[in-house]
């Protein structure tokens, strides 16, 4: 799916033209940040609202006034697609690419990934669980296309580069920068279909606020150095589907997922992870086929409790799409429900 890959250093002259902010370093002492473009609204222009946008290359998007006073920036266009086209195979490709870059480029302070906002939280969480090393990966995007009045892409890119350059960002895993706030990939979710302040972390809040003076964290870094899951030797990820619970739902979708080869099912349950009687019967049939079932909530916040001895594993406060990412990776290690339950408990 790769489109092209180039390394383009932004011209230093740009900083002189636009005036570097106080504290700007000269190019030889600046942190180095690689920006990987994958598409999304941030890379769109033209007939966006008619569903036929022009795609803007990442090197052009990075022409943001003042951004090269923060870091020396390289760019590469990995893909240029809407985030609805990004799924598990792309997650693995992107994660491996980032781990390779970190291994080969000791000069990099961090990496920024631009991504459509619709499924950004899923890609970011997968990277959080799998990318090697302690240096930061920052995922960002925008709610408004690049040529719209009030476009939020330039500010989000500036914030993302600021965090990726920051030594205090190390050991915190993959994070998302949107609207001057930094979120953990695990906690963040898109809560509004159109507004620029759409990204929130229900119950847990942002990790930091970002402004021109710096990045202001709420807590010290947990100093993570290794990913939770290694992708070594994995060629394809197990199929995991999400079954939505709603009044009167029958078991047709769950039976169809099992017939299609699902190894795991996440229930986007009502309230504290509930399903209808017909869905519960279908889930019992699924378990009899060896499918591992995790219950989450469709409410948008709050916990679904679970225990290692329960037949159904609780997702805690992971939303359905995050629980699916964790279950997908957990199933690469074990298909035993009690061990999967333990992995979910460790990720609370
Ligand atoms: N449809 C876009 C995407 O996710 C939305 C966005 O980027 O904000 O690719």
Image: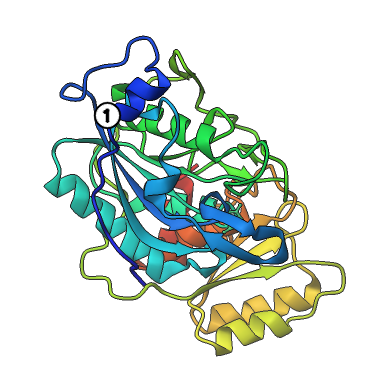
- Residue 240 point in image, percent of width and height: 51, 72
Q: Residue at x 27, y 52 (%)?
A: 98
- Residue 267 point in image, percent of width and height: 65, 65
47 with respect to 213 (left or right): right
Q: Quadrant of residue 280 in the image?
A: bottom right
Q: Residue at x 59, y 82 (%)?
A: 257
Q: How many marks?
A: 1
Image: 254 above or below 51: below
Quadrant of the image containing the N terminus: bottom left
Say if residue 70 shows up in the picture: no
Q: Can you tell me which quadrant of the image ligand 1 is in? A: bottom right
Which residue is label 1 attached to? 12
Q: Residue at x 48, y 55 (%)?
A: 56
Q: Nearer the viewer, residue 212 or 198?
A: 212
- Residue 71 point in image, percent of width and height: 30, 28
As drawn, which residue projects farthest toward the right? 248
Helix or strand or loop: what does disc 1 sit on? loop
266 with respect to 15 (left or right): right
Q: Residue at x 66, y 80 (%)?
A: 254
46 with respect to 42 (left or right): right
As drawn, which residue projects farthest toward the bottom? 259
Q: Decide: few, some or many residues near mark 1? Use Cα within 10 Å; few <14, some 14-19, many ≥20.
A: few
Question: Within 8 Å: ligand 1 and the Cβ of disc 1?
Answer: no
Q: Nearer the viewer, residue 135 or 69?
A: 69
Image: 302 above or below 119: above
């Amino acid at each position: 799916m790769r489109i092209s890959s180039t390394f383009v250093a932004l011209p230093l002259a740009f900083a002189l033209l636009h005036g570097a902010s106080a504290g700007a370093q000269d190019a030889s002492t600046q942190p180095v940040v690689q920006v990987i473009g994958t598409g999304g609204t941030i890379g769109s222009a033209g007939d966006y609202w008619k569903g036929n946008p022009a795609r803007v290359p990442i090197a052009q998007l990075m022409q943001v006034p003042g951004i090269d006073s923060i870091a020396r920036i390289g760019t590469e266009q990995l893909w240029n697609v809407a985030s609805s086209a990004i799924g598990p195979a792309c997650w693995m490709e992107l994660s491996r690419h980032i781990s390779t870059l970190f291994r080969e480029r000791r000069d990099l302070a961090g990496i920024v990934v631009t991504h459509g906002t619709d499924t950004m939280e899923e890609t970011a969480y997968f990277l959080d669980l799998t990318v090697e090393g302690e240096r930061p990966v920052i995922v960002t995007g925008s709610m408004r296309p690049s040529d719209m009045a009030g476009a939020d892409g330039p500010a989000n890119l500036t914030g993302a580069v600021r965090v990726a350059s920051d030594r205090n960002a190390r050991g915190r895993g993959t994070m998302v920068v949107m609207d001057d706030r930094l979120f953990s990939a695990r906690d963040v979710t898109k809560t509004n279909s159109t507004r620029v302040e759409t990204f929130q972390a229900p119950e847990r809040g942002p990790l930091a606020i970002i402004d021109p003076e710096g990045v202001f964290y709420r807590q010290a870094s947990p100093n993570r150095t290794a990913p939770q899951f290694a992708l070594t030797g994995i060629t394809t990820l197990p199929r995991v589907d999400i079954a939505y619970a709603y009044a009167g739902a029958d078991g047709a979708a769950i039976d169809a997922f099992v017939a299609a080869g699902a190894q795991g099912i996440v229930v986007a349950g009502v309230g504290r992870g509930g399903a209808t009687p017909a869905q519960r019967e279908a889930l019992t049939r699924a378990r009899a086929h060896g499918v591992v079932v995790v219950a989450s909530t469709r409410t948008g916040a709050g916990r679904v409790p679970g225990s290692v001895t329960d037949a159904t594993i609780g997702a805690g406060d992971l939303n359905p799409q995050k629980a699916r990412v964790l279950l997908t990776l957990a199933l690469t290690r074990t298909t035993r429900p009690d061990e999967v339950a333990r992995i979910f408990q460790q990720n609370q």
